[in-house]
Image (tube, rainbow, N blue to C red):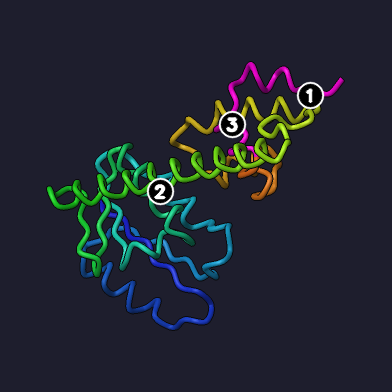
Amino acid sequence: MKIGYARVSTKEQNLNLQIEALEKAGCEIIFRETISGATKVRPELDKMISQFRKGDELVVWKLDRLGRSLKHIIDLVLRLSEEGIIIKGLTDGVDTSTINGRLFLNIMASLAEYERELIRERTKAGLESARARGRTGGRPKGFTKDTISKLLVMRSVYKDMDKTPEQIYKGLQLTRATFYRYAKILDTHTNEEIKKMEKR
């Protein structure tokens, strides 16, 4: 099935233009989202994703309609592609069913990996700098049992490509800032190390 997704902020007036283009592209269903780009919750996007089946096509006016940041777009496109969903961007010329489209996916995957490596390197550099100044670094003073539990669950759930970071931190009742702080801890510590950090 060919499914379209159109999104504009409340200040924009071009939703009809997107809808018309998606209809011409042969979309059988079109999900419409009128919401600010800074807003994290996108009910129509979540509803659409829940209805996808392997082999479906997701068509958008432009790939930036899918997310509020490059990282969010990359994560979503890669996850949907792994689930067998074809993604097409009408004005981007993106079509993941083609050779060029698969090349595009490889580039996106490389960008995602590059960002992860960059975070690891920055974390490592920060720890080394702290140690050079006489601070131990790397090991927080200690966690409560609840925090340790959430860290371990988060590591397990984060491997699930069906879930976005937003779904994970909301499910664990974490703020976005806490989620990414925990992610850095998980990048530099094993489960066994984290378990030993319980406050006494």
Q: Position of residue 45 (x, y in %)?
A: 46, 55
Q: Position of residue 150 (x, y in %)?
A: 69, 30
Q: Is the residue marked by circle 3 packed among few (<14), some (14-19), or many (20+) residues within 10 Å?
A: some
Q: Residue at 39% of width from left, 66% of height from top?
A: 6
N-term-proximal mark, 3 vs 1? 1
Of tags 3 and 1, which is closer to the observer? 3
Q: Residue at 43% of width from left, 66% of height from top?
A: 32
Q: Are marks 2 and 3 in contact (CB under 8 Å)?
A: no
Q: Is the residue marked by circle 2 packed among few (<14), some (14-19), or many (20+) residues within 10 Å?
A: some
User: Of helix, strand and loop, which one carries label 1?
Assistant: helix
Q: Is the residue marked by circle 1 packed among few (<14), some (14-19), or many (20+) residues within 10 Å?
A: some
- Say what amino acid the circle numbered 2 marks: Leu
Side of 21 where 45 appears, left or right? right
Q: Is residue 198 magenta?
A: yes
Residue 186, labelled with which disc? 3
From the viewer's side, name the closer residue of 159 and 121. Answer: 121
Q: Which residue is mark 1?
A: 145
Residue 76, labelled with which disc? 2
Q: How many marks?
A: 3
- Say what amino acid the circle numbered 1 marks: Lys
User: Of helix, strand and loop, which one carries label 2?
Assistant: helix
Name the chief secondary structure element in magenta.
helix
- Say what amino acid the circle numbered 3 marks: Leu
User: Of helix, strand and loop, which one carries label 3?
Assistant: helix
Q: Residue at 38% of width from left, 51% of height from top?
A: 74
Question: Which quarter of the figure has residue 200?
Answer: top right
Q: Is residue 95 magenta?
A: no
Measured Cα–Cα span from mark 1 to mark 2: 32 Å
Q: Is residue 36 above or below residue 103?
A: below
Q: Is residue 159 above or below residue 85?
A: above
Magenta-highlighted residues: 182-200
